[in-house]
Amino acid sequence: MAKDFFRYMFPSKAPIDKQLVFFPYWRFKGMLFACNPKGINHKFIDVSHQAIKSHYIPHSVGLRSQALKLQFIAPETEGRFLKPTQSLDHVIQTFKHRFGKTLVKPILHQSHIGETISLLYSPTYIKDKVYDALLNQPVSSLLPDDFDIEQFPGGAPDWRIQFISTLCPNCGWDLEGERDTLVLLCKNCTAAWYAAGNSLKQLKFGLFPCGKKNGIYLPFWRIRADIKGIQLDSYADLIRVANLPKVALNKWHELGFRFWAPAFKVRPRVFLRLSSNMTLSQPHENLTSELPNGRHQPITMPVTEAVDSLTINLSSFIKPQTKLVDLVPEVKIDAKSFVLVYLPFQEGHHEFIQSDLQLAISKNTLSLSRNL
């Protein structure tokens, strides 16, 4: 765990006798969704921006954040680490302004989903110029005679990552989970846990039973919310709002409406498709209090980020789209509760298939999602 955000550094290849100076960069990674009168634009973003305003260093780290292996920074890490002077809020506004130029106007609603904020430190050393300690090449022009690196506040790193025990708080059993998961499972007392602060909190979950083998369980967040600005309390309301080709039965007025969203990271187009299709399907089968027995995708999308996607999810299925201009700015969604649901998919040649809900997701998509 980190108190605020994680701090990483690139490994240095500088000569041994060089004193390293680490320049900070804010990194923003996630999905951008923007609703306009004609639909929804989306893109995946992985960008960086200097956290110290200086023309002696590049404005970003480019593709290095995606191509190179990052290392955690510890208090014993040698070198001078400069402190950010450009606030995170300022840089995020810069990012939003840059991305906004390419979006279709007018923008009715905009969301950043699955966003990850971190600080990247790029190693340099100073001679007559600022030298990149990865390539050992200059990145600045000749430095002025009065240049003094001490003018930038900084010093030894004074932060560290924190650890919490992964023993089940209920029974003391070893919790299980892959290295990138946000939820740990106890197979002994059938419980699911997620980190909150310096401790673990129990998570409400359920599973759709599946008698077939040779499949995989994919996790989804099922979210109950209060919605203002549009009548959407029941499955019957959903049929009307989405203009589904069904005649609402009387009992459907009693079935509560729920939003659904993937609990794992995928590309924006797939995230939107799965969220919309699952929400329109509104599966109402009774869940079992079991953990998946077999392959399952780790939970990598926090429920807080799934909640941020609800307005975009709603905008994706409102019909006709001409209603978006009037409805979307007035809609207010307040999430009240959530459940983690494991849904069984059967394995095909190239896809995992949920035949009951007529859903399919490419195996390559799941593989690529581990790198998002």
Image: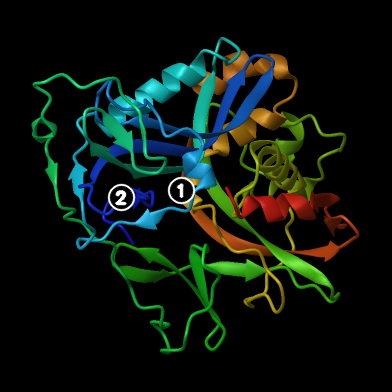
Residue 197 position in % (x across, y down): 30, 62
- Which image quarter: residue 299? bottom right
Label 2 Cα crowd, 10 Å radius (few <14 / some 14-19 / many 20+): few
Q: Residue at x 57, y 68 (%)?
A: 205
Which of the two residues, 315 or 123, is positioned nearer the viewer here? 123
Which of the two residues, 10 or 230, is positioned nearer the viewer here? 10
- Which image quarter: residue 53? top left
Query: Is 31 on the left or on the right of 119, as rendered?
Result: right
How far apart are the two marked residues, 2 and 1, measured between alpha carbons?
45 Å
* Viewer can see residue 196: yes
Amino acid tagged 2: Pro
Q: Residue at x 52, y 12 (%)?
A: 101
Amino acid tagged 1: Thr
Residue 127 position in % (x across, y down): 21, 33
**203 to 22, vertically: above or below:** below
Instruction: Give whichever of discs 2 and 1 has the lower sequence position.
Output: 2
Label 1 Cα crowd, 10 Å radius (few <14 / some 14-19 / many 20+): few
Per the image, the residue denoted by label 1 is 304
**294 to 153, vertically: above or below:** below
Which of the numbered marks, if any, corresponds to residue 191?
Answer: none
As drawn, the residue found furthest toward the top would be 105
Residue 159 position in % (x across, y down): 20, 56
Q: Residue at x 24, y 31 (%)?
A: 87
Judged from the image, the secondary structure of the residue bearing numbered disc 2 is loop
Per the image, the residue denoted by label 2 is 15
Query: Is 29 on the left or on the right of 249, as rendered?
Result: left
> Is the image coloured rainbow, by chain, by secondary structure, or in one colour?
rainbow
Q: Residue at x 73, y 49 (%)?
A: 365
Q: Nearer the viewer, mark 2 or mark 1?
A: 2
How many labels, in total?
2
- Which image quarter: residue 342? bottom right
Residue 1 position in % (x across, y down): 34, 62
